[in-house]
């Protein structure tokens, strides 16, 4: 081949791979942002990706290298993955016609190869000058979101948000299984602060309106708040280590580990007093493999903990009430958080472990107006729909609909285990005696006599909900000592690993959303 | 001025700090009773307590100010 043709090619490739103008590289550096190709080097095993398509997209335009997005195939934890990554040095990562086409094509590739797809988002949104070509048509940006929905549950979809995802672009993270956000730089919003001021008269900062911290702690659009890009990428790699390449495969096992040496003694963690707080994280640490717990939505609805972990090396999804926060009561957001997490684990064959210590769903005007009933129904619905092995552990109390939402006996857990201090009831003794004997209590005039009556009724009630009575009635399947819980769970999940439950031939349930 | 606000509706069960106390970030300042549970309210920032806004037995709603710090 003519040497000069090769040289020309090599030069053009190098030029395109350098991305946009130097001043945009500098601007990125000042914000703590890595260049898109450096992000990819951190993401892939040994920093390598040798398959890239559309490098020459829009190469007739000198200022739009790769049309502002890199689409590549590489490996993470030895598993093949597809990636799309915006280049914010090229027109702020905005989308033109070929940008959109490249994203659609890598989605189609990931679907055909049945491998996970990662979206490394850092984009100002649509290029208005290209709108006719990239916005409304069959292969316009809408197709990206359509594909995301169709891919959901077939292949894992992960979003790392390094910068803005504005207007329509904000739906890329919204349709991913998980959204990792880099603090200060990541943002997600439909209308910018400037637009908010012009259209509705609101004065607000970008951070307040759609910053990463807000989304990870208030709106729930973000699942993990990373302090640096490196931390965000490491989290994505760890996260994918729990997932199979697609829904027809099983999640990967890791080397089994004992719980952390510094984990607290499980016997001393749960107080006997049903109403006293304790830290459920201590309990989780004492049960799962050392350093395996990967929390999802740590900053959002903290009264409920959701996270992936390993038991004897095998992945498990944990849904646990946190009595330390809001008494572990279920709220609108916590029900929503649980519902989403359960459906994520179920889609990829990750068994579910429910650690229950719940006084019930919150009551009062505020939550009724916010639709606590339909949000609670959402949680109960996804938990009922889940066909993976489900193990329900009543750690302490399980009152009212809280028992149901946490995979209580009626919801076909493979087993319902109880710790010795477990208490299962419609409501706690104090509330129950008040509810049943309210008029009678009021009618007793002598305070001492009244108190004696209340105590006697509470004692009777305690006997009614005695754990051995519940076990005798086969409501709970077994009572387990805390120190034996880990062993019991390992044996149970191992036994249930061949569980097969097929859905019916209906189209889908009508979700109570 | 920093504030500790109620994270949920309930009644004040115990006050753990007094005006003038220096407290560390993450420390519990008040215990609320709600849904028959004892629910500790912690401060997100350290500082000196300038005022305790509630008394034992008071009903508070989510978002109400409980304690103010310097």
Image: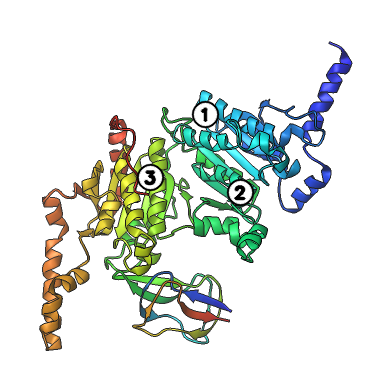
- Chain ID at mark 3: A
Whichever of callouts 3 and 2 sits on the residue coming sooner in the sequence is 2
**Residue A167, numbered circle:** 2
Q: Could you say where residue A63 lies in the image, as x and y percent from the top left?
A: 81, 37
* A123 in relation to A59, above or below: below
Q: Nearer the viewer, residue A138 or A256?
A: A138
Tell me which residue sits at (47%, 36%) in the image.
A152
Task: Say what secondary structure mark 2 lies in.
Answer: helix
Task: Please tell me how crowded label 3 is: few (under 14), some (14-19), or many (20+) other residues with Cα within 10 Å.
Answer: many
Horizontal side of A174 relative to A345 (left or right) equals right
Task: Say what secondary structure mark 1 lies in.
Answer: loop
Q: Could you say where residue A159 lies in the image, as x and y percent from the top left?
A: 56, 42
Q: Is residue A285 visible?
A: no
Q: CA distance from mark 3 to mark 1?
A: 21 Å
Whichever of callouts 3 and 1 sits on the residue coming sooner in the sequence is 1
Q: Which of the 4 image quadrants contains residue A426?
A: bottom left
Q: Nearer the viewer, residue A484 or A322?
A: A322
Position of the N terminus of chain A, as image quadrant, is top right
Q: Could you say where residue A136 lies in the image, as x and y percent from the top left?
A: 60, 37
**Residue A342, numbered circle:** 3
Q: Residue furthest bottom?
A: A446
| Colouring used for the render | rainbow
Q: CA distance from mark 1 to mark 2?
A: 28 Å
Task: Please tell me how crowded label 2 is: few (under 14), some (14-19), or many (20+) other residues with Cα within 10 Å.
Answer: some
**Residue A465, numbered circle:** none
Q: Looking at the picture, do discs 3 and 2 lie on one chain?
A: yes
* A5 in relation to A420, above or below: above
């Amino acid at each position: 081949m003519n040497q000069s043709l090769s040289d020309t090619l090599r030069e053009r490739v190098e030029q395109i791979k350098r991305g946009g103008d130097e001043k945009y590289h500098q601007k990125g550096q000042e914000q703590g942002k890595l260049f898109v190709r450096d992000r990819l080097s951190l993401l892939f095993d040994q920093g390598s990706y040798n398959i890239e398509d559309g490098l020459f997209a829009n190469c007739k335009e000198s200022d739009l290298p790769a049309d502002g997005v890199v689409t590549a195939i590489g490996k993470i934890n030895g598993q093949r993955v597809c990636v799309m990554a915006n280049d914010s040095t090229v027109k702020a990562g905005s989308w033109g016609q070929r940008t959109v086409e490249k994203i659609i094509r890598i989605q189609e590739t990931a679907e055909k190869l049945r491998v996970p797809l990662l979206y490394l988002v850092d984009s100002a949104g649509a290029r208005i000058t290209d709108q006719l070509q990239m916005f409304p048509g069959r292969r316009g940006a809408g197709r990206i979101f359509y594909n995301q929905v169709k891919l959901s549950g077939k292949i894992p979809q992960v979003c790392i948000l390094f910068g803005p995802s504005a207007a329509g672009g904000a739906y890329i993270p919204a349709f991913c299984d998980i959204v990792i956000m880099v603090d200060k730089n990541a943002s997600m919003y439909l209308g910018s602060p400037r637009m908010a001021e012009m259209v509705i008269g609101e004065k607000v900062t970008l951070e307040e309106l759609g910053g990463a911290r807000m989304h990870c702690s208030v709106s729930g659009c973000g699942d993990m708040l990373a302090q640096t890009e490196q931390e965000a990428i490491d989290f994505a790699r760890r996260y994918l280590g729990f997932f199979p390449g697609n829904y027809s495969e099983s999640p990967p096992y890791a080397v089994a580990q004992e719980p952390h040496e510094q984990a607290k003694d499980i016997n001393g963690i749960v107080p006997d007093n049903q109403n006293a707080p304790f830290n459920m994280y201590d309990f989780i640490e004492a049960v799962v493999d050392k350093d395996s717990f990967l929390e999802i939505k740590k900053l959002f609805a903290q009264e409920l903990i959701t996270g992936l972990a390993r038991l004897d090396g095998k992945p498990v999804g944990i849904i646990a009430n946190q009595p330390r926060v809001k008494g572990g009561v279920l709220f609108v957001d916590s029900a929503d958080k649980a519902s989403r997490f359960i459906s994520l684990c179920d889609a990829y064959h990750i068994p579910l472990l429910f650690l229950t210590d719940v006084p019930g769903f919150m009551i009062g005007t505020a939550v009724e107006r916010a639709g606590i009933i339909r949000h609670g129904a959402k949680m109960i619905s996804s938990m009922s729909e889940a066909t993976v092995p489900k193990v329900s552990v009543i750690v302490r109390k399980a009152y009212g609909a809280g028992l149901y939402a946490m995979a209580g006996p009626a919801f076909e857990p493979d087993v319902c285990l109880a710790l010795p201090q477990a208490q299962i009831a419609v409501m706690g003794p104090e509330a129950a005696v008040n509810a049943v004997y309210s008029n009678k209590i009021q009618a007793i005039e002598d305070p001492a006599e009244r108190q004696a009556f209340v105590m006697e009724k509470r004692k009777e009630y305690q006997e009614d909900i005695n754990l051995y009575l519940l076990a005798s009635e086969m409501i709970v399947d077994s009572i387990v000592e805390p120190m034996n819980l880990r062993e019991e769970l390992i044996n149970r999940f191992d036994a249930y690993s061949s569980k097969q439950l097929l859905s019916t031939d209906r189209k889908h349930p009508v979700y109570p959303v | 001025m920093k504030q500790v606000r109620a994270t949920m509706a309930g009644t004040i069960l115990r006050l753990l700090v007094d005006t003038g106390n220096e407290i560390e970030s993450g420390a519990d300042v008040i215990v609320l009773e709600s849904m028959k549970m004892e629910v500790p309210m912690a401060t997100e920032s350290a500082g000196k307590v300038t005022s305790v806004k509630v008394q034992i037995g008071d009903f508070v709603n989510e978002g109400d100010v409980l304690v103010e710090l310097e």
